[in-house]
Image: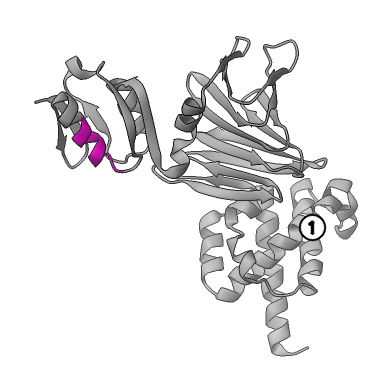
């Protein structure tokens, strides 16, 4: 074995160790990022074992991966068996091509999140994709031939193409199973969860309902703890309002200024503040950039004579 082969083998083992630790939830993300960014070979090795790891998941789910591990504590056994499987796979793998460069830390860890004002699209598996809105967090896993996606914070758009694997979205204690060809938006808040089925159909299960509820396309379900889900129809215009954030926009259609500002502040590091209570109930409409409220403020001034004062830590709205 040449020195180059020995070095590559060591890097592959390190990458397998990192992936095993990430999937078990024991990895130090900062240390991982330092390792991965320290050498291009590290990043490529991690991409390679991540891809191999997806192909080996069925072995772990079937219990076959235990054959590679000596008896140890449960968490150590999981890491060791996963490491050996990945190392064996990495040894015979071809180097990752450009297509693999989209495989990220989040995909390997089965978890992803966004910062305020950020959007992120992730292909979970063939035929299943999700897009995270501002300040959101999700995690997912493959189990029994299906994918379970859990919304931990914020808002997510989940899409399942025809032919894609079964997919379930979990929001707290509620679960929505998305049919093939479906697209659903889920938004979590302190008041509960809003589910909007924009395409296809879904089946909704909640702890407070006797049976699963069928949710056809262009329907919105409001889920509040302690109450059965309430369904209402939405128009195609309203559906466009729900999904406008995917184009980096906010779409208002008769909302009060107070509600519009609350929606805007989900995306802004410098929040908008209504300094004059008399303007809180002004009604407005239109499409605006979600992360740049300049045009929004100009429209308020032109239509209602509301002035925006851009300060270092906030934007104050007052009547001129």
Residue 281 drawn above or below residue 103: above
Report the residue that reaches farthest toward the bottom: 2
Numbered circles on residues, count: 1
Figure quadrant of the C terminus: top left
The residue at 32%/39% (across/down) is: 268
Residue behind mark 1: 55
Report the residue that reaches farthest toward the left: 320
SS majority, magenta:
helix
Look at the image and give the residue range highlighted in magenta. 292-299
Expressed as whole percent of the image width and height from the top left, the position of residue 231 reads 59, 15
Residue 71 visible within the image: no
Residue 87 drawn above or below residue 121: below
Report the residue that reaches farthest toward the front: 236
- Apparent side of residue 165 relative to residue 172 in the rendered image (left or right): right
Residue 297 drawn above or below residue 112: above
- Apparent side of residue 311 relative to residue 130 in the rendered image (left or right): left
């Amino acid at each position: 074995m040449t020195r180059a082969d020995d070095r590559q083998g060591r890097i592959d083992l390190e990458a397998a160790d990192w992936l095993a630790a990430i999937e078990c939830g024991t990895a130090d993300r900062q240390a991982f990022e330092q390792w991965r960014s320290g050498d291009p070979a590290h990043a490529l090795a991690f991409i390679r074992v991540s891809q191999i790891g997806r192909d080996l998941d069925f072995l772990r789910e079937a219990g076959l991966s235990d054959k590679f591990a000596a008896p140890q504590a449960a968490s150590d056994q999981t890491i060791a068996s996963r490491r050996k499987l990945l190392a064996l796979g990495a040894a015979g793998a071809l180097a990752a091509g450009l297509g693999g460069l989209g495989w990220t830390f989040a995909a390997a860890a089965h978890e992803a999140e966004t910062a305020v004002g950020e959007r992120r699209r992730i292909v979970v598996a063939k035929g299943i994709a999700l897009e995270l809105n501002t300040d959101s967090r999700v995690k997912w896993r493959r189990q029994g031939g299906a994918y379970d996606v859990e919304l931990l914070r914020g808002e997510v758009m989940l899409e399942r193409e025809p032919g894609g694997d079964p997919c379930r979205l979990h929001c707290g204690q509620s679960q929505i199973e998305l049919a093939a060809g479906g697209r659903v938006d889920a938004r979590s808040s302190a008041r509960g969860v809003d589910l909007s089925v924009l395409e296809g159909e879904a089946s909704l299960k909640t702890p407070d309902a006797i049976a699963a509820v069928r949710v056809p396309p262009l329907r919105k379900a409001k889920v509040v703890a302690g109450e059965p889900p309430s369904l209402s129809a939405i128009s195609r215009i309203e559906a466009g309002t729900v999904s406008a954030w995917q184009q980096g926009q906010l779409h208002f259609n008769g909302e009060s200024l107070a509600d519009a500002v609350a929606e805007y502040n989900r995306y802004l590091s410098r929040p908008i503040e209504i300094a004059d209570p008399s303007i809180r109930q002004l009604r407005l409409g239109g499409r605006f950039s979600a992360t740049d409220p300049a045009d929004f403020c100009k429209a308020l001034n032109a239509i209602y004579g509301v002035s925006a004062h851009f300060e270092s830590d906030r934007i104050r709205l007052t009547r001129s």
